[in-house]
């Protein structure tokens, strides 16, 4: 779902199948989304390590989602936002490493 309202869901359960010979782990992830009016909806989604750019979801993780305002139980992980956050974190870590290297040099 590329459209819809943005939200954040918490991972409340994960079942992972190792990558095996194909190199891509599969995950069944139970997500809980709490809306502004305190409505709580849960949904079980299937995803792969490729969807999460190699990351493995863990209980307690927070994932950006998009949901249908008229039917909040219809929500999906916003994988574009996940990838953007990962890229920002990688850039931050690279900048810190470069700064440390320059301080030593």
Image: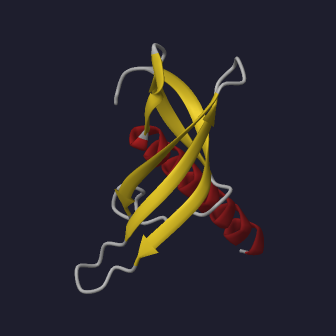
Comparing 86 with 32, the one in front is: 32
Residue at 37 percent across and 55 percent down: it is 46
Q: Is residue 4 left or right of residue 58?
A: left
Inspect this view and state whether residue 65 appears. yes
Image coloring type: secondary structure
Residue 60 versus residue 24 in the image, above or below: above
Q: Nearer the viewer, residue 79 or 28?
A: 28
Residue 56 in view? no
Callout count: 0
Q: Is residue 54 above or below residue 82?
A: below
Q: Residue furthest bottom?
A: 21
Residue 20, position as x, y percentages in the image: 30, 85
Give percent across and percent down for residue 1.
34, 30
Q: Which residue, as the protein is rendered here, is positioned at the far top?
A: 70
Residue at 53%, 64% in the rendered image: 14
Query: Quarter of the image holding residue 96?
Result: bottom right
Q: Which residue corresponds to the image point at 55% horizontal and 53% vertical from the top-left?
A: 91
Using the image, determine if residue 74 lies above or below residue 37: below
Q: Could you say which is closer to the camera, residue 79 or residue 33?
A: 33
Which residue of the protein is positioned furthest toward the right in this rendering?
103
Q: Which residue: 29% across, 78% down?
A: 23
Percent x, y for residue 49? Answer: 38, 65
Q: Quadrant of the C terminus?
A: bottom right
């Amino acid at each position: 779902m590329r459209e819809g309202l943005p939200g954040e869901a918490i991972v409340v359960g994960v079942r992972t199948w190792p990558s095996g010979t194909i190199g891509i782990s599969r995950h069944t992830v139970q997500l809980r989304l709490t809306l502004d009016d305190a409505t709580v909806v849960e949904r079980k989604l299937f995803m792969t390590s490729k969807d999460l750019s190699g990351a493995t979801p863990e209980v307690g993780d927070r994932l950006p989602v998009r949901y249908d305002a008229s039917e909040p139980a219809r929500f999906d992980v916003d994988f574009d936002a996940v990838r953007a956050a990962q890229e920002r974190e990688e850039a931050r870590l690279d900048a810190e490493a470069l700064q440390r290297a320059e301080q030593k040099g």
